[in-house]
Image (cartoon, grey):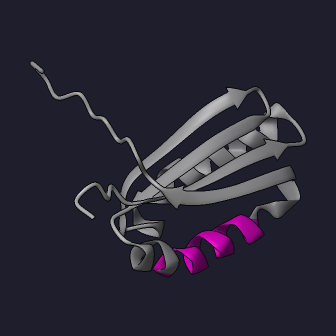
């Protein structure tokens, strides 16, 4: 349909402590663009001292699926830092980006 705005992959990560969350965040921010080159939008939000919310948006389900392997590898390399993770995905119904002057 003409209203299709892509697919979002959302990950909530709870860490054992603030230091672990900061270490993960610093490493992820460095590599995210090259790790997920098919993503049109990557957003990381610190939701508490020891938790992060990550959103990746893709144009197609195929792009999202193609990006699963590299992110799963990255996550598994850091899983000792995680207390808990929650993973969600689905179609995007709003992706508003305010442009300068609008």
Q: How many marks?
A: 0
Is 26 on the left or on the right of 2, as rendered? right
Q: Main secondary structure of the magenta part?
A: helix
| Position of residue 8 measured from the top left corner of the image (x, y, whole percent) | 49, 56
Q: Is residue 76 above or below residue 31?
A: below
The quarter of the displayed image where residue 98 is located: top left
Residue 7 falls left or right of residue 59: right
| Picture residue at 42% right of the left edge, 56% below the top | 57
Residue 6, given in percent of the width and then of the height, sits at: 37, 60
Against 34, is 13 above or below? above
Residue 11 placement (x, y as % from top left): 66, 52
Tell me which segment is drawn in magenta. 66-77
Residue at the outermost left position: 101
- For image coordinates 76% across by 62% down, the residue present is 78
Image quadrant occupied by the N terminus: bottom left
The relative height of residue 26 versus residue 32 in the rendered view (above or below) is: above
Residue situated in front as seen by the camera: 96 or 56: 96
**Camera-nearest residue between 37 and 28:** 37
- Residue at 38% across, 41% down: 94
Residue 31 visible (yes or no): no
Asked whether 2 falls inside the magenta stretch, the response is no
Residue positioned 57% across, 53% down in the render: 28
As rendered, which of 68 and 34 lies closer to the eye?
Answer: 68
Of 47 and 21, the residue lying toward us: 47
- Residue 76 location (% of width, % of height): 76, 70
- Outermost residue on the front side: it is 1
| Residue 87 visible within the image | yes
Task: Tell me if 24 is positioned left or right of 101 in this view.
Answer: right
Q: Residue furthest top?
A: 101
């Amino acid at each position: 349909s003409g209203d299709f705005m892509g697919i979002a992959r959302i990950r909530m990560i709870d860490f054992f402590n603030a230091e672990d969350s900061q270490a993960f965040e610093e490493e992820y921010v460095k590599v995210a663009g090259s790790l997920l080159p098919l993503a049109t939008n990557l957003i990381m939000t610190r939701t508490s001292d020891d938790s992060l919310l990550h959103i990746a948006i893709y144009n197609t389900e195929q792009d999202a699926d193609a990006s699963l392997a590299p992110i799963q590898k990255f996550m598994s390399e850091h899983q000792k830092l995680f207390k808990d993770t929650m993973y969600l995905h689905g179609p995007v119904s709003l992706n508003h980006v305010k442009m300068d002057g609008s």
